[in-house]
Image (tube, rainbow, N blue to C red):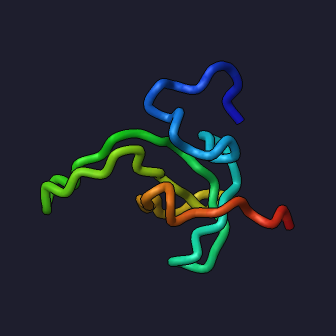
Amino acid sequence: MISGPRPASHHGLPDWLNEGARVFDPGRECEAIVQFIGDYEDPYTGRYMPNAVFLRPEGGGAEWIVAPDALRPADGH
């Protein structure tokens, strides 16, 4: 997990939501590791998402993007 002060853009996010954190994505019903949090504009739709959360399964795999309010802390299995 990254230490140090949170970027100003992350101040509205819960304390548990940081790069490197293990989270649960109810939309996919799985746990994942936060790779990056930042503003994102979909190149195909032009949809803008502030503080988009980029997730990847532990051990690697295809990355996906989720809005921060769709996530919750992982149970810690």
Between 39 and 57, which is closer to the camera in this rendering?
Answer: 39
State whether residue 63 is above or below residue 3: below
When asked about the image quadrant of residue 13, the answer is top right
When asked about the image quadrant of residue 59, the answer is bottom right
Among all residues in the image, which is located at the extreme right? 77
State whether residue 48 is above or below residue 30: above
Tell me the quarter of the image containing the N terminus: top right
Residue drawn 30% across the image and 51% down it:
49
Residue drawn 50% across the image and 35% down it:
10
Among all residues in the image, which is located at the extreme front? 12
Residue drawn 67% across the image and 67% down it:
31
Say whether residue 70 is left or right of residue 42: right
Say whether residue 66 is left or right of residue 56: left
Between 34 and 58, which is closer to the camera in this rendering?
Answer: 34
Counting from the top left corner in percent of width and height, residue 73 is at 71, 59
Residue drawn 63% across the image and 20% down it:
5
Between 20 and 14, which is closer to the camera in this rendering?
Answer: 14
Counting from the top left corner in percent of width and height, residue 62 is at 47, 63
Total of numbered circles in the picture?
0
Tell me the quarter of the image containing the C terminus: bottom right
Say whether residue 7 is left or right of residue 14: left
Counting from the top left corner in percent of width and height, residue 15 is at 67, 41
